[in-house]
Amino acid sequence: MTLPTVAPLNEKALARRIKDHVVGRSHEFFAVVHPGFEETARRELQGLGVAGPEVRGSGGVAFSGRLEDAWRVNMGAGTLSRLLMRLARFKATGFAEFRARLAGCPWELHLAERARVRFEVSSSGSRLWHEGRLEQEAMQAVAGRLAAHGRSAVFPGAAASGPEPLQLIFIRMEENRCLVSLDTSGELLYRRGRDKLIGTAPLRETLACAILREAGIERYGVLLDPFCGSGTFALEAGAIFCGRPVNSGRAFAFQNWPAHKPARFRHLRDELERRFRENAPSGARKIYCSDIDPGAAETTRRNLERADLAAIAEVDPADFFRLHPPAVDPARVLLALNPPYGERQQPGGDIASFYRRIGDKVRRDYAGCGWAIIVPGLEIEKALGLPHDKKILFNNGGISVALLIHDSVTRNARPMEDKRGKVAER
């Protein structure tokens, strides 16, 4: 659906309105995060200079700020899946009212000429329950508003004349109240903008970063990843060790907005990269990766090379149970384990026995190290039998799992105990 443009808009007047109402004012933002790691993301946003971020329910952190805060968050926050900018809130009990209220939003300030727009609509507990009808009404409202201001957009089903980037608009109806949000990110933020080779059932980059952040990776000098897969833990740890904003090399949806200033964006990106380098963990850093599957180890090696991290990493095709710990102070080592479970588990394998062997190996060879271990269920956690200082429940690939974290930096002096069958619920 595409509406033709009418008389040209006064471009100077539009530029003033964009400066006053989009660039020059504060907006409300909502960061989408992996449920279970909201507090991790909140702390990361604080570290990026965001004022007063607050956890909002499961899977979200809210904050207020300027557009430049959204730029910085998209580039520098490794734990977020997407960043939304709230545009409108209103009540609607009929479709005509919904369309009129949505048409009242100043879309000409936010959407570029011939922007390719797609709606993500959800409705719960509302009289306006038909999501397909809501999408049609939204298209008419946005198209009508843009046409009245000399602009047009390309909607689903219409043929695009060029490679226009996609702009998502989220519409959520809940108990007859509508929340309208504009996606600032574009592709989900786990897509770091690098050409990464993918293995079987990979851990998403945003989740791996959240796990490492929660375990305090910046306080360790060595990351050990013996089930490396495609190397996601290693890549995320490498960015932290080297002081690199994880997403500074990729594109974002906000770069296509009328309010975007490319020169100012490049300056802010350079400043963010400088700040990350200055705040990078001090001292020598090292990453050791291995996997029993030679193909996975080779994938990790190539990914680390592409990310320019080969200088601080070693990759070997090796069985975890035959590995020897690196010759470094154990207190400086963080052991990050995402063992096979679910579709990665060997058919007919005894997963409880497998995790019991992992627990025995860690107690025997990595007693002084910190660790962050993903465990699929309480019974498997009991079989693992390792003490932990923190436990976070979450879902990974549709499977309910727990992250167990042992902090060797502050608790290394405490003797390890065999707690098999006596796992504390923390």
Image (cartoon, rainbow, N blue to C red):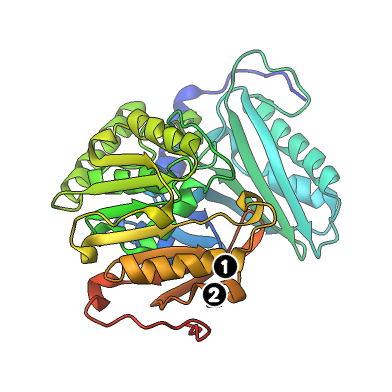
- Residue at 44 percent across and 25 percent down: it is 12
Image coordinates for residue 179, horizontal then vertical, percent: 65, 55
The reply, left or right, for residue 248 in relation to residue 345 is left
For residue 48, say whether it is visible.
Answer: no
Residue 223 percent coordinates (x, y): 31, 53
Classify mark 2: helix, strand or loop: helix
Q: Quadrant of the N terminus?
A: top right
Pick whichever of labels 1 and 2 is earlier in the sequence: 1
The image's mark for residue 353 is 1
| Marks 1 and 2, how far apart at CA | 7 Å
Q: Is 390 on the left or on the right of 311, as rendered? A: right
Asked if labels 2 and 1 touch by Cβ distance under 8 angstroms, the answer is yes
Compared with 124, 264 (above or below) is: above
Q: Residue at x 45, y 50 (%)?
A: 227
Residue beneath label 2, please? 383
| Residue type highlighted by circle 2 | Ala
Instruction: Provide the secondary structure element on which disc 1 rests.
Output: helix
Pick the residue in front: 123 or 236.
236
